[in-house]
Amino acid sequence: MALYKPQTVECNGETFHVYLTEKELRERIAELGKELSERYAGKNPIFIGVLNGAYIFLSDLMRRVEIPCEVDFLKLSSYGDEKVSSGQVTDLKDIDANIEGRNVILVEDIVDTGLSMKYIVDKLQKKNPASIATVTLLHKSEATHHDVQLDYVGFKIPTLFVLGYGLDYAQEGRNLAQIYILDGE
Ligand code: 5GP
Ligand code: MG
Ligand code: MG
């Protein structure tokens, strides 16, 4: 079956081009899976994915983890349908699992200002897990001004809008198999 990975793509009237290829993503995610498998051997970690953006990354990452593990999800909204962060985090769904005493691996698609990640870590800490590690596929490191600890970063990227591989632009583009960036940026 062919993956959906054009060189350029139109989304909401704007043109995007490939920034991280399917191969680059696959290879980096395999490395992250190996590191997590080693660190969490014997610990039965629980992955917590942040919906919607992280669902594709999380599913690929978990299939590279070769130890017993579990998964749950929470859902937040911060970007609305715009290309810049609203600066507000809204809770849309909490996790169902009891994470008290558990080793949590929190998985995000992208950390921009860091507001969402900080908000989620603070919220999960209150549930008394044994540990929380943070994983993000992408990090706009120059834009991050909230105090967040990122334990595993797939790729550092410039402060530019990206889509694909789970990330949307006004809900479109999540099904692209690669990461795309606005033309001219
Ligand atoms: P932060 O709270 O770190 O400012 O933003 C985090 C959230 O904003 C991410 O989880 C993601 O949903 C969204 N976001 C940040 N940058 C981008 C981007 O370049 N493209 C897309 N599609 N979403 C982004
Ligand atoms: Mg996200
Ligand atoms: Mg979004």
Image (cartoon, grey):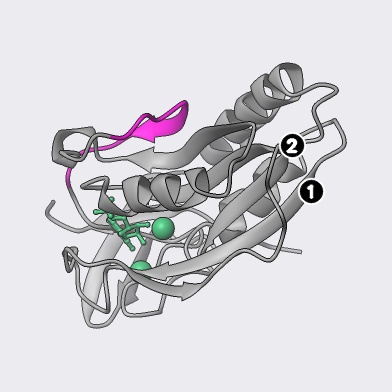
Q: Amino acid at mark 2?
A: Pro
For the point 22% across and 82% down, the residue is: 13
In-image side of 139 versus 176 (left or right): left
Range shown magenta: 148-159
Residue 67 is drawn in which quadrant? top right
Between 106 and 162, the one nearer to me in the picture:
106
Proximity of marks 2 and 1: CB atoms separated by less than 8 Å:
yes
Distance between mark 2 and mark 1 Cα atoms: 6 Å
- The local secondary structure at tag 2 comes to loop
State which quarter of the image contains the N terminus.
bottom right
> Dividing the image into four equal quarters, which quarter contains ligand 1?
bottom left
Between 16 and 38, the one nearer to me in the picture:
38
Question: Height in image: 29 above or below 111?
Answer: above
The percent coordinates of residue 135 (x first, y second) are 50, 37
Q: Which residue is mark 1?
A: 70
The percent coordinates of residue 43 (x first, y second) are 80, 27
Question: Height in image: 24 above or below 182?
Answer: above
The residue carrying pointer 1 sits among few (fewer than 14), some (14 to 19) or many (20 or more) residues within 10 Å by Cα, namely some
- Asked if the stretch drawn in magenta spans residue 60, the answer is no
- Asked if the stretch drawn in magenta spans residue 156, the answer is yes
Q: Which residue is mark 2?
A: 45
